[in-house]
Image (cartoon, helix red, strand yellow):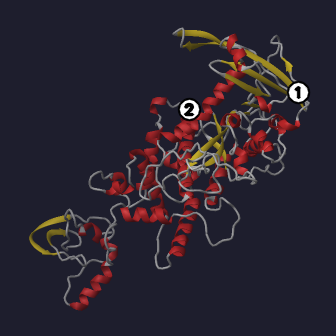
Amino acid sequence: MASFNGKPAREPRARAPPVDSEDSCLSDSGDSDEEPTPKPGGKISSSSVWFGEGSSSDEDTEKTPLCTRAAAAGGKPAAPLKRKNVVWKTVKQQNSDKKVPVWVNSLPDGESVRSPIEYFRHFFDEQLLDSIVEQSNVYCRQQNPNHDLRLDQTSLEQFIGTAVYMSFFHLPQSRMYWSSACRVQQVADVLSRDRWEEIKQFIHFSDNTAPNDDRLFKIRLIVDSLLPKFQALPQDQMLCVHEQTVPIPDRSALKQQCKWAYKIFVLCNTKGLVHSFDIYTGNTDPAPDQPDIGAGGNIVLKLAQAIQDHVNHLLYFDEQFSSLDLFVALEKRGIPALGTVQQAALPGCSFSTDSEMKKKGRGAFEEQQAEVENVDIRAVKWFDSRAVIVASTFAGAQPVSTKQRWDRKLKRNVSVEHPSIISLYKKFKGGVDALDALINHYPIHIRSKKYYHRLFFHFVDMVIVNSWLLYRRDCESLGLHSKKQMDLLAFRSSIAQALCMEGKNLMEKRRGWPSPDVELEFQKKKRRGPAKAIPAQEVRTDAVGHWPVVENGRQRCKFPQCKGQTVIKCGKCNIHLCLKRNSNCFLEFHI
């Protein structure tokens, strides 16, 4: 681009997105279509190779599988580029059926339906909460040796509970939950505003002074605690590999594809129950004792370690992971697989073009077959509103069913042929979207400049969804009618209420100076002059028979540092104590 004086004009600088406010509770999507361009003579980063950044054409990038992109960028040779001698044959539809593997495992029957908070505390157990409390108190002392956070398990649960409550209301700023204009009782009555902000500022999950090369050390405590619990959950037959993005408002080496988001790969069933996960950090090396089959395949094999071999679990993944080597590696482990695939990941396989299949009409399909290392792989290209290629080691086109689909031009339903492999693909596809849908119903939107805070709240949402799905599984196994089951909103609300109130004393004084020690203040008063005797601490705090009695005459309140006069006295302790809207000395004297 040239300017008016003939000199080359500067390219416009890309604006950085605005930094999130520290006190706001609404988060933006964090998505960005802008892709970085490598410097002349420079090398493309591993994250750019993984997601095809720096490509000259977005369309070409989208049509290229991950393993092919890695090889083209100068990384390790990818599987599709190695297998040039694969022979594909057109399948004759007569007697070409492939039987879906029989499910030889079954889910255990639920013994009883537990309360929502019990499901939640199975994942966020006391050991995890105590570790968070310890690291948060240490972090506070590291930041300010003169300040003590005094965080305990009760306060931490109340903080998490208020964060879950905030996911229902979505006020623009966190301080509005305590404001007089739009005060939210479920939040403001649990923790004071300053205490809530103090816990948010210092909540921490690692020791910054400990030497560590782990890129996830800030959140490693949460990952190491939740991952084994997810992997131990009983699994259905149909499983999916799925990806999630967590928006982050700053730059970090962990982010990929989108400049302002983290990528999390998850293994879940078709209902959204998470069995394993892996946070992408730029490293796509194979897992121990696993073959190196390219970036996308290594991710799938790493997550598939949580799957039991040779029990006919069916695994689905989409086109960014698919390769022939991945299908072969999974089949050798006894895990039948199915996934969408790009044409570039099937070397030697030729289908009709999209325009040619469009002329054949909706429901047209073609099937190809290849044998790779004694593994039979079927690939089917099917056209409906657009073309899609699906490959599998256990399914093929036959049997073909007919389903009614709406035709916009004819304004009526028409019959469209559905190959068997396409019907299975649609079942898997619905499960892939189920997890995102459940989390995005009521996500926690608490802004923070610290990336590990965003990941922590995302895992809280993930745990609540897992807990609800386990609750639904137990209800179904015991035959409980769906109308008697809690929906996700009621389930989340029950967890938030239990975290905020169960086993907590919400009547403690939380504002102003700490409540005085009654015994100590009474001894000071006796030294200054005559003072009316008060009962022993064991008597005044036994919570039995302390009833307020109205007297005819007023007397000075006997609670230390209170100079008010009142007609209310305790019938058991026989001393006058204030019992007003703004000063409840009667309650504080007896706790």
Could you tell whether 137 is left or right of 426 in the image? left
Which of the two residues, 48 or 413, is positioned nearer the viewer here? 48
Amino acid type for the residue under numbered disc 1: Glu
Residue 325, relative to residue 292: is it above or below? Answer: above
Disc with the residue nearer the chain's start (1 vs 2):
1
Horizontal and vertical percent position of residue 62: 68, 35
Q: Where's the C terminus, which quadrant?
A: bottom left
Marks 1 and 2 in Cβ contact (< 8 Å) = no
Viewer can see residue 470: yes
Question: Gap in Å between the C-alphas at discs 1 and 2?
Answer: 42 Å
Residue 580, relative to residue 309: is it above or below? Answer: below
Identify the residue shown where x is 67% and y is 21%: 423
Mark 2 neighbour density, 10 Å: few (under 14) some (14–19) many (20 or more):
some
Amino acid type for the residue under numbered disc 2: Glu
Horizontal and vertical percent position of residue 222: 61, 57
Residue 10, relative to residue 61: is it above or below? Answer: below
Which residue does the numbered mark 1 point to in the structure image?
Answer: 371
Which of the two residues, 111 or 581, is positioned nearer the viewer here? 581
Count how many numbered circles sit on residues in the image: 2
Which numbered tag is attached to residue 476?
2
Element marked by disc 1: strand
Identify the residue shown where x is 47% and y is 74%: 148
Identify the residue shown where x is 64% and y is 25%: 426
Mark 1 neighbour density, 10 Å: few (under 14) some (14–19) many (20 or more):
some
Q: Where's the N terminus, which quadrant?
A: top right
Which numbered tag is attached to residue 569?
none
Horizontal and vertical percent position of residue 556: 15, 76
Horizontal and vertical percent position of residue 63: 71, 33
- Of the two numbered discs 1 and 2 in the rendering, the one whose residue sits closer to the viewer: 1
